[in-house]
Amino acid sequence: MPSCSEPVTRSRFERRLPDGKYDLMFKVAFGSYSAAARHFNVSRMTLWRWRHEWAPIPKVVAEKMKKLVHEKVVEAHEAEVQLRDFLALPPKPERPLSGCCAGRHRRPKRLN
């Protein structure tokens, strides 16, 4: 007997189509599809057609996307270098206790 645990109808919030072939390219370059549509001065539907290969992406748009994605990659590499340099630094020494606590010792910090 088949299981009845799954609903027969799909949720209205479930995506009807899978992601487009070029979704990641636009998401990386602009962060949202609306921002990409505003940048290229086209409708969101036109952008959807480009992402799902229902309409060819114009050469001008492809060249601009190549430049934008490259800038994001360079920015990510710079952030990676900064993070690596930060992690390579030795921890700062704790400052000495002063005042009435000068003769006492600190308790070690607890890591949560």
Image (cartoon, helix red, strand yellow):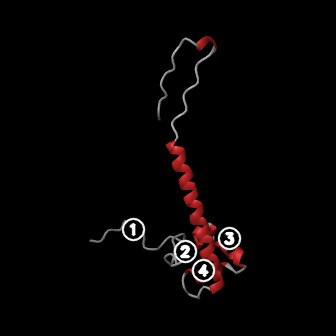
Q: Earlier in the sequence, mark 4 or mark 1?
A: 1
Q: Which mark is residue 48?
A: 4
Q: Which mark is residue 6?
A: 1
Q: Residue shown at 62%/16% (left/top)? A: 98
Q: Residue shown at 37%/65% (left/top)? A: 5
- In the picture provided, is 23 more to the left or to the right than 32? left
Q: Name the residue beneath numbered marker 2.
A: 23
Give SS at disc 4. helix
**Which mark is nearer the camera, 4 or 2?**
2
Callout 4 amino acid: Trp
Q: Name the residue beneath numbered marker 3.
A: 35
For disc 3, the neighbor class at 10 Å (few under 14, some 14 to 19, many from 20) is: some
Of residue 42 and residue 57, the one placed in the foreground of this image is 57
**Is 15 rendered above or below residue 50?**
above
Percent of width and height locating residue 28: 58, 68
Marks 4,1: beta carbons within 8 A: no
**Which mark is nearer the camera, 4 or 3?**
3
Q: Earlier in the sequence, mark 3 or mark 2?
A: 2
Q: Earlier in the sequence, mark 4 or mark 3?
A: 3
